[in-house]
């Protein structure tokens, strides 16, 4: 068996309709749709990438946010994981910043291969296969201009187009790279195509703007092109397609500068631990806070409790805020995690486009009304997961809960390989209807009248939504 993964960055499953995405809607109807698929927390791209390839959540693999503060590696600034240079800085001399082996490493050990073709960020692509060069694997990003993979594709297809909004030219170039070169010539056991849309357009144009509709249509064509390639192969019955997203989106209804808000509250907050700074803030939809002194946690919590846009604080060490929930409840507590993570108070009501879901956010480059993700809103956590072909059931809906960390163990199982070091579940409900069962709902009470709805499946808890009473 072989597998092709098509990841549509940021795609909300409720936007997969015959009107917006006819090829993907038809594929989902023909294969197995995992209706209860979720992202990890924080629901950010590089965290999701790490979880996808390691089969683990952030507490195990250690990539805890898109933006991280590490006082030893960079005391004066934040580490941006979209940058390969910053990821190498975080790795501190190791081959990878991830603390569990990835899918590419496990496959290579067994004499199998992973090929990564991406028009996402360079950091995302690196995390998908950190040791590709050393293992003789294939990893290419649309921004690459050096290396064997970049030279091969430039010779065959010409240079990749510049980034744009919508990022359709790069998306289409990546599809050509996959279907014209990588799949037919390299024949990897697992191929990952990472599409930058609709995430880019969601962020910078909004969830249902005209340009975003074009981006969704381009993403749909990408799915169709890969499916057409697969269906034309003599061994098509043994090639499974997976179409998935890494997180969803909500509309950013209130743009904030959390560091400035904290300064107005009397706290010395900044993006690095310069002299006099008390709190380091990493802007996000779920901002991380690193404290110079643990005693700051309680006054910070008391101040934020007075802000109408603030939701609950999650602590890496529960001793910082007795009674507050810990990041461990979400498998997100790691030494690299922020001391505190703030969840914004979102709502399920309609946004400016009439779509459900909006929330405050802190992101300097995203306009108010643009899409955001990272937190625990229902629309941020909900992801697409469709499997079609190979052993998967036809025209089926799997009811059980799952997340990105469950996919790599499932792929290895289908390839007859053990999921070494992985914590995720094998999604056998995809080919065995008898293994499917609805999850058991749970609720976790949070300070400030909030609650977290979760689902329990196979001994694992999956977050569904942060709600306010």
Image: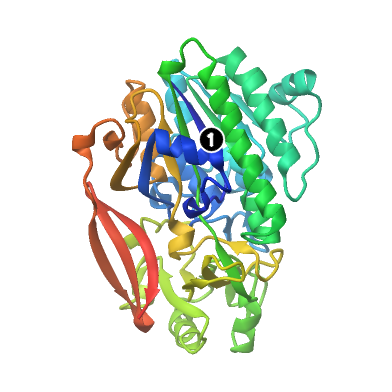
- In the image, 467: left or right of 76? left
Query: Quarter of the image containing the C terminus?
Result: bottom left
Q: Judge left or right: residue 174 versus residue 390.
A: right
The residue that mark 1 highlights is: 6
Q: Residue furthest top?
A: 234
For this orientation, the residue located farthest to the left is: 434
Residue drawn at the location 55% of the way across and 48% of the way down: 46
Q: Give the percent coordinates (x, y) of residue 356.
A: 50, 67
Q: Residue at x 28, y 47 (%)?
A: 400
Q: Nearer the viewer, residue 90 or 148?
A: 148
**Compared with residue 322, is residue 134 higher up or lower down, i.e. above or below?**
above
In the image, residue 245 lies at what x, y percent? 50, 45
Figure coloring? rainbow
- In this rendering, the count of numbered labels is 1
The answer to whether residue 293 of the structure is visible from this angle is yes
Instruction: Pick whichever, 131 or 1, lies toward us.
Output: 1
Disc 1 secondary structure class: strand
Q: Quadrant of the N terminus?
A: top left
Residue 146 figure quarter: top right
Viewer-proximal residue among 31 and 379: 31
Residue 376 lies in quadrant: bottom left
Residue 80 to residue 352: above or below? above
Tell me if 33 is positioned left or right of 93 in this view: left
User: As rendered, which of 226 and 444 lies closer to the eye?
Assistant: 226
Q: Position of residue 2 (x, y in %)?
A: 44, 20
Residue 120 in sight in this render? no
How packed is label 1: few (under 14 Cα within 10 Å), some, or many (20 or more)?
many
Vertical relation: 117 (above or below) 112:
below
Give how far across and how far down residue 163 sits, in percent: 77, 44
């Amino acid at each position: 068996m072989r597998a092709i993964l098509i990841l549509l960055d940021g795609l909300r499953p409720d936007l997969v309709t015959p009107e917006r995405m006819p090829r993907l809607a038809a594929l989902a109807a023909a294969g197995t749709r995992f209706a209860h698929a979720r992202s990890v927390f924080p629901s950010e791209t590089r965290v999701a990438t790490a979880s996808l390839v390691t089969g683990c959540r952030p507490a195990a693999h250690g990539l805890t946010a898109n933006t991280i503060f590490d006082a030893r590696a960079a005391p004066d600034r934040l580490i941006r994981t979209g940058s390969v240079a910053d990821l190498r800085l975080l790795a501190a001399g190791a081959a990878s910043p991830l603390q569990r082996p990835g899918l590419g490493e496990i496959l290579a050990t067994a004499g199998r291969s992973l090929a990564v073709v991406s028009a996402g960020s360079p950091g995302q692509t690196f995390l998908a296969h950190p040791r590709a060069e050393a293992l003789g694997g294939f990893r290419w990003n649309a921004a690459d201009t050096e290396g064997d993979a970049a030279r091969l594709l430039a010779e065959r297809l010409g240079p990749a187009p510049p980034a744009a909004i919508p990022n359709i030219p790069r998306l289409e170039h990546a599809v050509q790279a996959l279907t014209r070169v990588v799949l037919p010539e390299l024949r990897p056991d697992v191929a990952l195509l990472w599409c930058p849309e609709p995430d880019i357009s969601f962020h910078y144009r909004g969830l249902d703007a005209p340009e975003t509709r074009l981006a969704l249509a381009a993403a749909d064509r990408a799915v169709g092109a890969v499916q057409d390639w697969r269906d034309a192969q003599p061994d098509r019955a043994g090639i499974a397609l997976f179409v998935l997203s890494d997180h969803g989106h909500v509309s950013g209804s209130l743009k904030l500068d959390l560091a400035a808000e904290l300064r107005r509250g009397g706290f010395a907050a900044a993006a690095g631990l310069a002299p006099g700074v008390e709190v380091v803030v990493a802007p996000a939809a779920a901002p991380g806070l690193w404290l110079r002194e643990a005693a700051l946690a309680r006054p910070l919590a008391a101040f934020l409790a007075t802000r109408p846009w603030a939701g609950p604080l999650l602590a890496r060490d529960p001793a910082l805020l007795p009674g507050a929930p810990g990041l461990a409840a979400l498998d997100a507590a790691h030494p690299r995690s922020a001391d505190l993570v703030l969840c914004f108070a979102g709502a399920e009501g309609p946004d400016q486009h009439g779509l459900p879901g909006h929330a405050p956010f802190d992101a300097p480059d995203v306009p108010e009304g643009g899409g955001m993700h990272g937190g625990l809103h229902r629309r941020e956590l909900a992801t697409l997961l469709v499997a079609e072909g190979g052993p998967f059931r036809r025209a089926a809906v799997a009811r059980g809960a799952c997340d990105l960390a469950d996919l790599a163990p499932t792929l290895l199982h289908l390839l007859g390989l053990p999921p070494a070091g992985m914590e995720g579940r094998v999604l056998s409900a995809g080919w065995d209807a008898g293994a499917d069962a609805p999850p058991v709902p749970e609720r976790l009470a949070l300070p400030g009248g909030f609650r977290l709805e979760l689902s329990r499946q196979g001994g694992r808890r999956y977050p569904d939504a942060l709600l306010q009473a």
